[in-house]
Image (cartoon, rainbow, N blue to C red):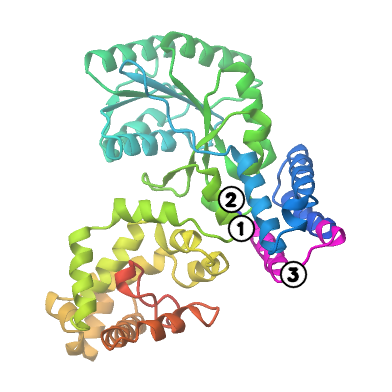
Amino acid sequence: MFVTLSNRLDAMSKRLRGKGRLTEDNIQETLREVRMALLEADVALPVVKDFIAQVRERALGAEVMKSLTPGQAFVKIVHDELVQIMGERNDGLDLNARPPAVVMVAGLQGSGKTTSIAKLGRLLRERDKKKVLAVSLDVYRPAAIDQLERLASEVGMDFYPTDPTGDVVATARAAADQARTGYYDVLLVDTAGRLHVDEAMMSEVRGVHEAITPVETLFVVDSMTGQDAVNTAQAFDQALPLTGLILTKADGDARGGAALSIRQITGKPIKFMGVGEKTDALEAFHPDRIASRILGMGDVLSLVEEVERSVDHSQAERMAGKLKKGKGFDLADMREQMQQVARMGGMGSLMDKLPGMGQMSEQVSQKMDDSQVSRQIAIINAMTPGERHRPEVINGSRKRRIAAGSGLQVQDVNRLLKQHKQMQKMMKQFKKGGMQKMMRQLGGGGGAPPGGMPPGGGLPPGLGGR
């Protein structure tokens, strides 16, 4: 997300940081670049005008002109104003109500409502330890009810069965009664996709809202639709008292215009952001962290939180011990590291959160995408336990058997074994106190690392390796 905007603003900030003094002409020229970058990112024109006006007013003041580092001061202003237009802080779900807290989800057809319900249920169950019940009121889309039932089972929340021929308002009331008598903490209500101009459908969703009085009414919006996302959110807010938004498909949106426009125009906070298809791919929307990502500063806080949730600490301690000894890193360890990265959203997600790595995230994603990681795990899975622990025994015939067992080629097996050897060399450097040299090799070239990040950092071997 924000790839285009981030690249433009990153280039601008690098130029400015090298200047000892900024003139009014410098600032005006830079603001023109920022304006074009925002418009190319499909940010709504009124938002762009307000943003540029605010930045100009602060940049032409003493805050920048008298600063010892005017370039950095200007970048900080841009960061602060980005945070301002996106909402300053994360607005989480307000579940401080007598249980069950009812959360109703609405949106256009195909925006990702049902998947978002599943992601939200998983987040509430795993992170907040809530007992969750879900109900589908989408009696119009074929298999919509079955889809939510299947997803509910997958994420471990309960499902209230829906009669496709029944009245949706009556079903909503019955689900709310079940949530009360079953001592559920949260009831998630999935509604049918509808257009705001369809008066009959809008009347129906208003009736559901009045019947169950939700504490949260979330509008799910597809970030890929850009300014249209803002317009539809505004129209729905006039029909329903929305409390917030879930921005879906953010991982596939290179522009990010919806994220930057929607709060300013609708006045409603973005509460969550969908960053993938899997049910764990839902992030709380933190404007300050998003602004840092846009400006190439990374998002270390989110990365730390992700590591805390995803990393097996006993496994990490065992790996640290191997690093300290400088020996024993086998293919089973390599597989564990790859699986760990997959649990944290893949390489692209990790690189996006590391300061200064935004430019590299696209290169790394191309060289080491999730499908490639899956193929490498498949190769290791096709080995015997002995081969994983002693890869030096893998000869030609074993390679052919492993390739056949994983459905890949012998060349793929050779490539994996070569990457593993590179990792072992790095281990020896680590043992000999060559950590600084190793980090220079990893980060100094400006491109993808030749042999991968060290396993103790939770990143898979062979980022650049062919």
Q: Residue under label 2, please give it.
A: 291
In the shown orientation, is residue 395 left or right of residue 411? Answer: left
Q: Is residue 167 visible?
A: no
Q: Residue under label 1, please give it.
A: 295
- First to last magenta residue range: 3-27
Answer with the quarter of the image where residue 83 lies: top right
Q: Give the amino acid at mark 2.
A: Ala
Residue at image point 41% right, 30% down:
144
Q: Is residue 57 visible?
A: yes
Residue at image point 36% right, 32% down:
148
Measured in 3D between alpha carbons, the distance from the residue under mark 1 to the one under mark 3, in whole angstroms, is 20 Å
Main structural element of the magenta stretch: helix, strand or loop? helix
- Mark earlier in primary sequence (3, 2): 3
Q: Give the amino acid at mark 1.
A: Leu
Q: Quadrant of the C terminus?
A: bottom left
Point out residue 252 in the picture as x, y percentages from the top left corner: 55, 52
Q: Is residue 416 magenta?
A: no
Q: Residue under label 3, please give it.
A: 20
> In this rendering, is residue 212 above or below 227?
above
